[in-house]
Image (cartoon, coloured by chain):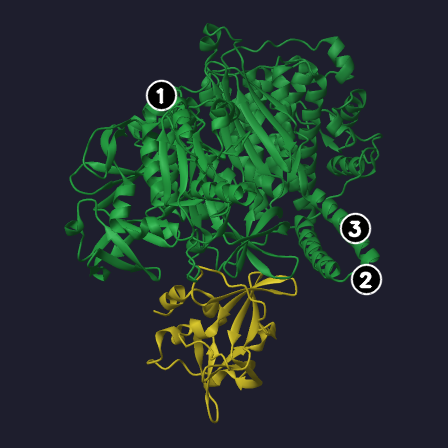
Amino acid sequence: MSEQEYVTFRIGGQIFGASVSEIQDVFSPVHMTPVPKAAGEIAGVLNLRGRIVTAICARARLGLPDLESDAPEPLAIGVERDGENFGIIIDAVGEVLRLDEGDLEENPVNLDRTWASVSKGVYRLENTLLVIMDIDRMLASPDAGEQAAA
Amino acid sequence: MDDLLSEFLTETAESLDVIDVELVRFESSPNDKNTLNNIFRLVHTIKGTCGFLGLPRLEAIAHAGETLLGKFRDGALDVTPDYVSLVLESIDQIKVLVAHLGEEGVEPDGDDRPIISRLEAAAEGRSEFSEAPAFKPAPVAVAAVAEPEPEPDDAGDPDLSGVPEGNGRWDADQGRYLRPGEVTLAELEAAFASVDGPPEVQNAQPTAPAGGSGGGAGVHDDDHEGRKGGPGPASIRVNVDVLESLMTMVSELVLTRNQLMQILRKAEDSEFKGPLQRLSSITAELQENVMKTRMQPIGSAWKKLPRIVRDASRDLGKKIELVMEGEQTELDRQVLELIKDPLTHMIRNSCDHGVEAPGDRLAAGKSEAGTIKLRAYHEGGHIIIEVGDDGAGLKTERIRQKAIEKGLVDPAEAHTMSDTQVHRMIFAPGFSTAAQVTNISGRGVGMDVVKTNVELIGGTIDLRAKQGEGTTFVIKIPLTLAIISALIVGAGEHRFAVPQLSVVELVRAGSRCEHKIEFIKNTRVLRLRDKLLPLVGLSDVLGLGDDGVDPGRADLNYIVVMQVGETRFGLIVDQVFDTEEIVVKPLSKRLGSMTQYSGATILGDGAVIMILDPNGVATSVASAAHAVRRVAKEERDAAHAGAGTQEQTSFLLFRAGGSEPRACPLSLITRLEDLDASTFEGTHRGPVVQYRGRLMPLVHPVGAHAMRSEGRQPVLVFSQGESVVGLAVEEILDIVEDRLDLQLSGQAPGVLGTAVLKNRSTEVIDLGYFLSQADPAWAEAAAGQRRKRQRVLLIDTHPFFRNMLAPLLKASSYDVEVASDLEEARARLAEGAFDAVLADTDALPDPEALQTELGAALQAPLIPMTSRQDAAYTALGPSVSKSDRHALLAALDQAIRVRGEAA
């Protein structure tokens, strides 16, 4: 069985993971320019070392409330798709875990549709569950994702 | 695909394009040996390379074509259009094969026998063409120039045709027998050496047959050595991707430079100043040069056009000559790619619809052959491309009719449109005037597609047409899409870039400015040089949060006047920052569907901002487009009203009692509101409503009983200093601009008279009457600020203004005497002293003369008034617009105050 390395991060009360190979970097999303009239989960665009990054708010995408104002500054995980740069805004970054691919379980059938659409599966860790994020679906618009899941 | 093959494909594609052009040129001047030799050489190179690369199908066709060309060159065959068509056909077949080769890497299966046998038949004179070609022996003179030794089968011996390979002459250089009609390599070299090629191929012509001993490979090598080592400008092939990434990096460098310069601006006397300045200028130079690498002469997009014109003129039975000017004009290759298709379509269009049939031309006293002229030149950061023909021009009446038929315009409107306006209808979607659909154009996707494509790259298109003299289309496109000049504007907290190309001008509007934003219900408009400009708030377009201040109602607004195609509108923004050269970055796919933006950019300060798409902004405001139409209509109506000696006045039409419309001068109204009737409260004086933090008395022209008690109640709000009064009406109908022709009559109180507005008899209400009825304090409100009532003399020849202004002035607690002419004015002045004199300068003598006329009797300051919308300067100072109540009162107040201080 092959092992995979996952970067873990927290959104709300849930720990998520994404394959290390998919994540370019982790940065703090500052000087973000909102894009009026854009879809709700588009947090804005920002300049990351001379490249324009489209920031997607994971909380909005997953239907979670906004981060409270007194919470620590959020972070963003940077990914590149088709030559474009995206940032997924998350609450906090955790450790890197090495997990066996065979242990990945399918999404529970009763999982919220939006969540199910962006989840590749779940790992049972010792004291928590780790949802493996489907980055492509996460970046796509919710409608497209839901249709794909349905 | 191996390098050799891809090299071959690129080169062959270029050669084929050249052949197309040259063949058409050759057809018109068959005696031009240079052209023919150039074609011959190119075809020969293709054949040779194909042989070397093992591409038998291509080689066979190229060979057959070359044979036929050889006959032309030797003078064995006369050049006829049919022959040229046949050669062009073979070139087309080669193109098909090359295209397949490019996709699959191998030649497609199939048989080219039909075309080859036709080529061979033509070469042998066994023609299937109707016009029997003259088959004459090679003249010695020609042979001396082109060919030292005539081919044996040149004589047209039919026995030698179709002989199998090997039965021909032996060519030692190629190591094989020659095919029918083929010449030896040595002969070919000799032929080339004896003739000068056209300039563009000169450096490809080998100075010596350096590698001429290797068969097909030799030809290939020759060509390369010629290119690399020959005289003339040295050039190399560079992958487009490399240029693109170079461009991206330079863009980044420019941005970083801008950032540094911004930091430097803040820091005075920095030791970095010198080096940074230098870095800045080098960056600019670098940018310019990298931009240059992306530039290509527009001629490369025109290469296919001569062929298209030729084919089209043959198909249509017309004689058309294509004249191209400014092929060397350079523009960005990205733009070049995008302009190709629209240009092709326009050229086809000109062939089909522009140039008339030869008979018609002769009948019109023109030369039989029509001319299509293609011109390109630079003009202020843009490139202008003109496509003009000397045809019949546009059939204005037919277009007008068609536009009505298609429902693009209503009949009444269509007949008031100017010719140019009618002509522009051909850009309307779904418009195609061709009576029958031809092969060339008129498939229903017409000029509207061209227009859309041109607009997609930030360009504009317009046309000039003159009956009987032709039509010219003018396209204006930016030189490059990568860097554009943009205006940075602010809405709320946000900044946006507006492409400068669409910005016509900037206007400041507000209570202290010359321009004011006015309201028709909730639609904002601006009077700009006698036109109504529809306005939209950027905050509204982008749905930015309402921060309490309604855009357009603030004290000071900036209006960016924009032109998108035919549509002109004003964009209200909160701030205008600067013009910047910005590097356009494409929108993320995730935002790609948004029509409001065309891209994003990084500003000098490092912030990312969105670039507004003027087209998107225009369409997202449907009402704006509607208003534009109305403005256009009003303009026409105004033009029809004729001489324009009479001033136009804007009126608000509303209904209040009865079905007849009533009117009130728009300029007197502060605001139009739609209030909730349930919030109205009754007082002993009448109904009031809480409005913007204070009580506003309400009056209804018919009486308080007509006031609604529930639902919405439209109210015209008039304000005067601290006090406001609302006039409730049943319905707000419209705003019209018309000449005022007031017929006075001794009518009911509250009515000034009747006027015909937009062909309807309309009662013009007496505002003064209603306002003092609603608020007896109306008059006193303003008076509180003054110690004693001032006496004002109002001289106006126009009864309407006398009747309108006198109550207004009274309401503002002035004592008003009225005079309708100079005679009367002198009498009034003699009677007593006035604090100020308001004189209408439109009808009366000019102000200076007026002053003299009134002479010593005039002790008070004279304030010139005009009924024109724009206040003009007169010898006595600025004149005041009669319809601008605030300005009028302010001027009066000022004049009296100045006089008081002086006394």
Amino acid type, mark 2: Ser
Q: What is the x, y in percent for residue B851?
A: 50, 26
Instruction: Give how far apart the Cα atoms at labels 2 and 3 are.
Output: 19 Å
Instruction: Tell me the number on the disc at residue B398.
Output: 1
Which chain has been coloured green in this picture?
B
On screen, residue B567 versus residue A74, left or right, reads left
Q: What is the x, y in percent for residue B189?
A: 79, 26
Instruction: Give how far apart the Cα atoms at labels 2 and 1 are.
Output: 70 Å
Upstream in sequence: badge 1 or badge 3: 3
Q: Quadrant of the C terminus of chain B?
A: top right
Amino acid type, mark 3: Ile
Q: What is the x, y in percent for residue B744?
A: 25, 28
Amino acid type, mark 1: Arg
Q: Secondary structure at mark 1?
A: helix
Residue annotated with mark 2 = B270
Kindly indicate whether the residues beneath marks 2 and 3 are on one polypeptide chain: yes
**Which of the pair B812/B111 is nearer the observer?**
B812
Residue annotated with mark 3 = B282
